[in-house]
Image: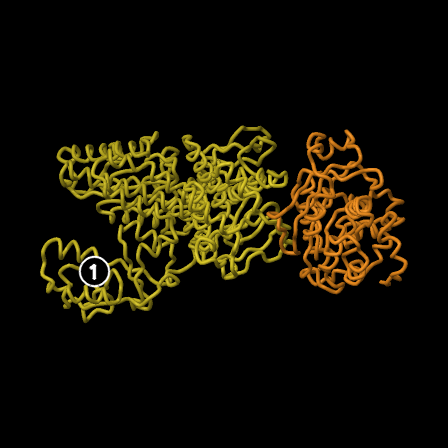
Chain colours: A orange, B yellow
Amino acid sequence: MFYLDKDKVKPHVCEGELDEELLESINDWRGRYEELERKARDPRLKRFYAAGIASAETPIRDVPLLSLDFETTGLDPARHGIVSVGCMPMTLSRINHSVAKFWVTKPRRALLDSSVVIHGITHTQIENAPDFNDIVDELLEEMAGRVMVVHYRGIERAFFHEALKNRLGEGIEFPVIDTMELEARLHRYQSRSIWRRFRGVRPVSIRLADSRKRYNLPWYRPHDAVIDALSAAELLQAQIAHHYSPETPIHDLWV
Amino acid sequence: MQAEHLEVLDFLRPYPPFRELPDEELERLAAVVEVGYFKHGSQILEYNQHVKDLHVVRSGAVEVLTRTGELHNRLSEGGFFGEGGLLRNGRVRYPVTALEDSLIYFIPGKEFSRLYDEYEEFADAVEIEDRERLKRTVSRTRKASDLMTATIASLVSREPVTISCNNTVREAAELMTAEDISSLLVHNNNADLPVGIITDKDLRRRVLAVGLSDQTPVSDIMTEGLVFVESHQRIFEAMLIMLRRNVRHLPVVNKKKTIGVLSISDLVHYESKSSLFVVSNIFKQNTVEELVCLVDDVRGSFIRLVEEDANSRMIGSAMAVIGRSFKQRLLELAEEKLGPAPVPYCFLALGSMARGEQLIVTDQDNALVLSDRFVPELHDDYFRELAQFVCDGLDACGYPYCTGNIMATNLQWRQPLAKWKKYFSDWIDNPCPESLLHSSIFFDLEGVWGRTDYADMLNDLIRKRAKRSKRFLACMARNALNRTPPLGFFKSFVMEKDGKHNNSINTKRRGTAPLADLIRVHALAVGSKRRNSFARLEDIHEANILPKGRAADLRDALEFISMVRIRHQALALQRGDEPNNNVAPDELSDFERNNLKDAFQILSNSQKFLRFQYPMGLS
């Protein structure tokens, strides 16, 4: 594990698209938060970073987590918007589903008919929904001090960053545990050998529903932000139980 | 209502106890659920840890263990646990581990307790679950200690408290109060073993209710004629002795010393209450009509025994004891009605009842052995009426008339002892097809009322003579080959040896009956005194006349076929259908089919062996 020269990360803090690769190379998120706290201009962001985050060596069992899911109008943060957000706090041993939060937000960009079909949120609901900006306070409060759990890190972090950049002129960074990536570590990196590809062995699906099945987790209706957050939360508990340990330091898991 | 709550709500709704709740409570509940994942093999609850939530299995399966690590229960999707601790002291009573990878929903204990207090149906559903588990525990415990092999010694918890027969009842009462017990053994100073027992009830009934002085000696009110059991006897035997003798206390003896008293309540944990209580109820009924009212209880106790995982030997014995009790009570009532018998007699139970292998579908096979002082012209009116009364009563109580007319109402089977001895001697010395048909019924006989020593004499005669008569045994052997098992199953059919298919199989005619016939031949050949097929197999095994392991195979085959038959009847009763012996292959699981096929194979091979042992030429 190498540590990135902080100067190289700097340009990405406030402007431009989020550079996933650079974020993924951050190991010391606690140090990064301290730095971001100094640099942030928006008081809400300052508060968020000031709450701190677990040090890299903290065992996963002691790390407060927040399972987070955004439903969006598409996959490109530059062109698509956020229509709903679901999240719930959790630890390795328990998912606090009872205090889950859910918001519908009004994306600045048009809602495509095709995405209505996917997450079942209609134009009417969206018309009456607040702007993402109005939920940021509450959402950041939920996220403060916690490491986020997502299934596929390309969405939540990128869309959040983009949404804040557009509204506040500065983006956001936070560590995530990506359950899809944990699944890929198991099935993709090892199993896609040349020999297996040659023999036509199909890669194992690492989509949320398929991954869950492997751990004997029940089927849930997909594409509702809170259910997806619950799904990812349960999947993470299962993954750690099977392939890691409660003692696994968080830096082995977060990106 | 949020969508993910809907997911939880939809999950909980169909399962007890949640399905007893109104929608608004379910919605509320769905919103407070928390979640945790447990890998296969991991511990979910540890013994004595604090339990704060009701646990519901969302997916996977868990195993509930007893403190000592024995299996208590297994739960799958929708099953719940932890309620025991929540309802009592907040501590886990039964540790739980994940049998599969499992997702558990946690419902806060506060919510659970509130629902438990507010909704009676919810509480009942929780309790029912609890009772079912307890029932299972009892049956597991029983398995662990094994009712059939665990000895009475394991139930004796304290030394007996005794009193001299010279003491007064007042002293007895004081001693019982001081020791906090409900019975005392009474000894006289010379004998090693106690001579009687007094109980709370005796003090009430025989002293207070009749106004005796508290200075009355204990010996005046004690119950004499104690029935002793040996500490090495099995719990199961103790239960049967209580059932048979209708006593509630058995002093337990070890090396000629009394080491304790076994009471009926000690056994209630081991045996379904019901069959013990059905028996005691039978003796409380005063008319045939009242006895008829107990039929449902008999069926209920049969079902309960099946649910409690009792084995076929136990169920067969319990049902036989119940059947015998009906006979005994009917005979008591008959004697009340007709007056005392003009000459002594013995009422016989025959066939499955005598073997202690009675089930719920059974017709009555019985007979009367009369004293040799019997003079038909003088006495037969009485015994005909007696027989009629008893057989009619049995028919009314669910033991239909014997279609083969093997009943005491038939003059042929209402004869003096000397005549009966002649019957048996003839059957043994000159076997003919007709007599052989009788032999499978008459050679299993038991005296249930009156001069049971007549029955003992007949049994002695059978045992001594049959063993010596090769010809008779050969005929019995041939008779035992008349009914054969099928080959196995194919799709939804019973497959016969000739390849024909049938829709169902008569598990008695094609399974348990030919097994009992076969076992009887061997038992007669080795001079076994016993009547129960399992007991006979023990004697046959001892005598070493079968190929190695065959006796054990036969025992397993008999047990398995009997249990299929028993479960089939219990299911019919539960559905409200009339039970029968015909099992359709569709009712059987693959596991049962495979095992049944094996059992049939064992029977078939044993029949071949019997044919080889008793070649036709000899007959």
Q: Which residue is mark 1?
A: B198
Which element is circle 1 on?
strand
Q: Amino acid at mark 1?
A: Ile
Seen in the picture, residue B256 relative to B347 is either above or below; the reply is: below
Q: Quadrant of residue B432?
A: top left
The percent position of residue A199, horizontal first and vertical second, equals 87, 44
Identity of the residue drawn at 82% across and 45% down = A162
Q: Quadrant of the N terminus of chain B?
A: top right
Identify which residue, A111 or B116, lies in the foreground: A111
> A191 and B347: which one is in front?
A191
Going 15% across and 59% down the picture, which residue do you hit? Answer: B221
Mark 1 nearby-residue class (10 Å; few <14, some 14–19, many ≥20): many
* Relative side of B44 to B406, left or right: right
User: Which chain is mark 1 on?
Assistant: B
Find residue B153 and report its horizontal and vertical position in percent: 37, 63
Query: Which one is in front, B20 or B551?
Result: B20
Q: Is residue B92 above or below residue A213?
A: below
Which quadrant, please, contains the C terminus of chain B? top left
Task: Give x and y (percent) for residue A131.
Answer: 73, 39
